[in-house]
Image (cartoon, rainbow, N blue to C red):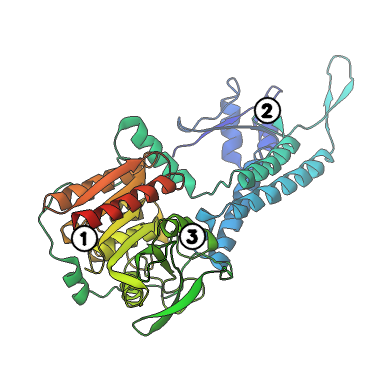
Amino acid sequence: MQLLLTVVDNTTVNDPTTVQNRLGPTRRLATLAARFRKTQGIFWGEDFMIIWRGWGAIVVAIVFGCSFIANLLSDIFGGMAYWDSHAWPFACALFAAGAIICVTDVILSRKPSRTLLDEKTGERIAVARNHDLFFLRVRWWGLMAVCGGVLVLAFNFTPGQTLRNRQNAQILKNGVRDPQLPQPQQSRAPVGDYAQARRTFRTNLLRKKPSPQPFEKTSVPAGVEQVEYSSGDLRLKAWLARGTGKAERQPAVLFLHGGWSFGEDDWKMAQPFRDAGFSVMVPILRGENGQAGDFSMFYDEVDDVIAAASYFAGRTDVDASHLYLAGHSAGATLTLLAACTSQSFRAAASFSGAPDQKTFLASGWNKVAPFDPAVPKEVEMRSAIVYAESFKCPVRIFCGNREPYFQQENRATAQLAQARGLDVEAISVPGDHYSAVPEEINRAIAFFRATDVLK
């Protein structure tokens, strides 16, 4: 982005020395300021403008510096996705910036004023030094930074929302994806079966660490059973509970939570399935919530999903012929991949997943990836859209109508599957990433029940 800088003062510039004292030690800026003294401005580019007087520009430096430090500390102690997905570090940065700005204003106000001599009368006039940014005194910017921090917490604004909101606005305005992002592929030659491809591919993790998302310790609610299932050499936990109804062997839903850590809200999200008479199991995957294993971002976790399904189907209180799969967000992405891998599921439903990892990574998540996003095979093996001909059960791919970013990927995935005669549909419902979920689950329940009639 180009930068336009405008320097404004309320006195006439008479010589380069005066300008140099006003702007600081950089002689080049002083010379240019004197050259453009009639317009009182120095211009670079056309896209951005900063207007300040005295030390007013220090406000920008303080806010940027505090945000940078908060971002760095979040990455170190919380993981690389923490800054993008949590509001409180940004709010703390604004609180700190506000305090520093107010202290800076006090220090600047103590500096002695300038004395001007009237040549005609010989009178000396004391002129206070003013420090403004966009015509507001420095002190007011400190108060505004504190208020900004309060608003960030009140509305739970996370820095990671900015890029995704920009992309959604672009799509809603023009009906197309941001041209800087890759377009989902509408047609291509079949690449083979996904389950077969997984037998020969091993992901190369550059960082072997747990999930980057922090977690809070959760207590198992009453009526919920915490169980263990085996995934290779790993012993992983899951929450499980029966649905309403008295049937000895109930139909069941394996529900994959959103994000990369499990919390009580994830369990509550799946409650409508239990109310509809389904037993529900929510597995906690490798590297999540302090468990063993390395976070691979949508690859090795598929093995955990299949292992959890095997455990769930093997229980005596579950009707294995009526085992369904559903998931939200990150769990929706895994739902699509698991539905391409295993024949264990009667039907599957995803809520706001990312079937095209090429576009997902390009939207900013490449910095979280523990693998090399520049290796095409690594990306392809995490993208259901590439293996859309491999779905092994009927699938409904849901998203909110306020998520245009996902709508194009979902439609493209469904079209590729339908071209092979598979029962896969992309469905948009009113709402966004979270508000659409209740309606998506209701439709998923109706879809699951309809598969019983069809079969």
Q: Position of residue 425 (x, y in %)?
A: 23, 48
Could you give the CA–CA distance between mark 2 and mark 1, rounded to whole angstroms?
Answer: 63 Å
First of labels 2, 1 by sequence position? 2
The amino acid sitting under disc 2 is Phe
The residue depicted at 47 percent of the width and 57 percent of the height is: 271
Foreground: disc 2 or disc 3:
3
The amino acid sitting under disc 1 is Cys
- Left or right: where does residue 151 sit relative to residue 48? right
Quadrant showing the C terminus: bottom left
Residue on which the image places disc 2: 135
Can residue 355 be seen from the camera position used here? no
First of labels 2, 3 by sequence position? 2
Q: Position of residue 5 (x, y in %)?
A: 55, 33
Residue on which the image places disc 3: 266
Depth check: give the residue in front, 155 or 331.
Answer: 331
Identify the element where label 1 is drawn. loop
Tag 2 near tag 1, CB within 8 Å = no
Tag 2 near tag 3, CB within 8 Å = no
Depth check: give the residue in front, 173 or 42.
Answer: 173
The residue depicted at 82 percent of the width and 30 percent of the height is: 128
Identify the element where label 3 is drawn. helix
Residue on which the image places disc 1: 393
